[in-house]
Amino acid sequence: MSTDQPRPVRAVLRRSVLAASVLDDLDVDLDDDGVRMPGCAPLQWADLARAAGEDSPQEAVRLRVADLLHAHLELHRSRARVVPLAVPVGADRHPRFGWSHREFLGGAVHLGLGVVVVRGRSERALPLPVVSARATGRPAQPGAQDLARLEELGDLVVQRLRRDACGRGNGVLRPVGGCDVPTLLTAATLREHLVAETEGSVFRAVAVPDRTRGWFDLARIDPAYVGAAWTATDPASRGFRRAVFVTRSEVALAPTSPRLVENVLAD
């Protein structure tokens, strides 16, 4: 995409930057070249346009631009935390371009790196922009240490699940170590445990409508709940719009049923 953006596109990007400045209290300075923030390398309009994507809904553009600004600012801080990050394919918060990632086997998520941004009492990992990695001299893709850390966190989740099984055993997955639930599902240690718990099956169905929690005991959940919960969740916090099938090597979206709504209403 060229540096010179059509005026309608530039206008949407400017409105998105100003919205982030007001809503998230970001100190930004706009000019014809791009966006500047104190202590950061400048961002060109082309950088924002790549993250936003052409012909994307304005709500998605605002979310992607705000995430880019926050990630860029955080990555320039000396104590920035970088973690593995998996983002569902097609999610509003998924940058169209400018985020280095690979498609995880199964096709439901893309796996790359994220930078942890703290907002109040909560923290959220945002896609690590390639332009920010270049400006700060950081890697843009997960290395062996990042993937090893992901497996360690997956093993930690397994230990917690085994501990909970001796108590309340509620079948709930939660974030750990800065990694949200969609990211944790890319850990082989966790997938192995989930599949091993299902006798005679090679996969486990998991519902993750919100990136902060997931359920793998779906016998207690109405099938229509997953889609309804996903719709009601803020786009910045959405997980998968329907259940995913987790195998020892894949994370794939469950196939849709054209009669699901009719069957639920009939029940």
Image (spheres, grey):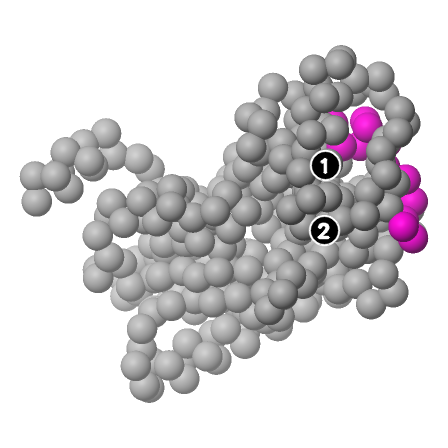
Where is residue 186? Give x, y as percent.
55, 56
Residue drawn at the location 86% of the way across and 55% of the way down: 76
Towards the viewer: 174 or 228: 228
Mark 2 lies on a secondary structure that is loop
Q: Which span is picked out in magenta?
A: 38-50
Within-10-Å neighbours for mark 2: few <14, some 14–19, many 20+: few
Where is residue 236? Give x, y as percent.
55, 47
Q: In the rendered image, which quarter contains the N terminus?
A: top right
Q: Is residue 39 magenta?
A: yes
Q: Quadrant of residue 45?
A: top right
Q: Which residue is mark 1?
A: 18
What count of labels does the image hold? Answer: 2
Q: In the rendered image, which quarter contains the C terminus?
A: top left
Residue drawn at the location 48% of the way across and 47% of the way down: 234
Mark 1 lies on a secondary structure that is helix
Residue drawn at the location 92% of the way across and 44% of the way down: 41
Q: Callout 2, which amino acid?
A: Asp
- Whether residue 139 is visible to the viewer of this picture, yes or no, is no
Q: Callout 1, which amino acid?
A: Leu
Q: Quadrant of residue 77?
A: bottom right
Q: Is residue 71 magenta?
A: no
Viewed as shown, does residue 67 lie left or right of 182?
right
